[in-house]
Image (cartoon, rainbow, N blue to C red):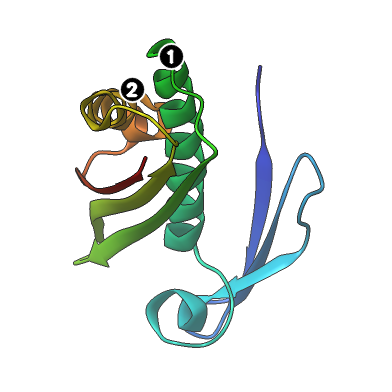
């Protein structure tokens, strides 16, 4: 399986702009610029997209790990903050809430640790990965 995206940049770094889209068509012609990446102008940027990828991948991986432990969650909600400093991604903080009525907290924590290490996006990121887990059993 292959997934793809395309991007185009026009102009110099500070005054230029770009667009990107994804193979599925879920989003096309999304605008990005120096100001959306390094300042506060509304719009997206690569780091935000990595955070979205990590949050969604981790949530799915955690659901799978819970299933391997006989737990079916009502929901797994993850927010991800990616830190970008000195032109490097340095940290990804996953803040996750698992709602799984009747679940054994120790098993949920074990599943979360396994998902943190095993999720494909975690594996590709070369940075610190932190996890804050809340369990509603």
Where is residue 22 shown, x and y percent of the image? 72, 46
- The image quadrant where one finds the C terminus is top left
In this image, 94 relative to 12: left or right?
A: left
| Element type where label 2 sits in the image | helix
Which x, y percent locates residue 63?
Answer: 48, 28
- Circle 2 residues within 10 Å: few <14, some 14–19, many ≥20: some
* Residue underneath mark 1: 70
Specify whether 92 is left or right of 72.
left
Q: Is residue 38 above or below residue 95?
A: below
Q: Residue 84: which quarter of the image? A: bottom left
In the rendered structure, are the residues bearing label 1 and label 2 in contact, judged by CB atoms less than 8 Å apart?
no
Residue most extreme to the right: 25
Residue position for label 2: 118
Left-right relation of 108 to 46: left
Q: Is residue 87 left or right of residue 3?
A: left
Find residue 57 and report its horizontal and vertical position in percent.
48, 36
The total number of labels drawn is 2
Q: As rendered, which of 74 and 88 lies closer to the eye?
A: 74
Front-most of 136 and 14?
136
Please provide percent x and percent y for residue 91.
22, 53
Q: Secondary structure at mark 1?
A: loop
Local packing at callout 1 (Cα closer than 10 Å; few below 14, some 14-19, many 20+) is: few
């Amino acid at each position: 399986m292959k997934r793809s995206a395309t991007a185009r940049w026009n102009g110099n770094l500070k005054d230029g702009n770009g667009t990107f889209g994804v193979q599925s068509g879920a989003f096309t012609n999304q605008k990005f610029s120096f100001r959306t990446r390094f300042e506060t102008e509304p719009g997206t940027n690569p780091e935000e997209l990595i955070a979205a990828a990590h949050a969604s991948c981790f949530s799915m991986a955690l659901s799978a790990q819970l299933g391997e432990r006989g737990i079916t969650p009502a929901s797994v909600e993850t927010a991800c903050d990616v830190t970008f400093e000195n032109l490097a991604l340095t940290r990804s903080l996953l803040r996750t809430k698992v709602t799984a009525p009747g679940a054994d907290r120790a098993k949920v924590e074990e599943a979360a640790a396994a998902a943190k290490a095993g999720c494909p996006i975690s594996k590709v990121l070369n940075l610190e990965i932190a996890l804050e887990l809340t369990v509603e059993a």
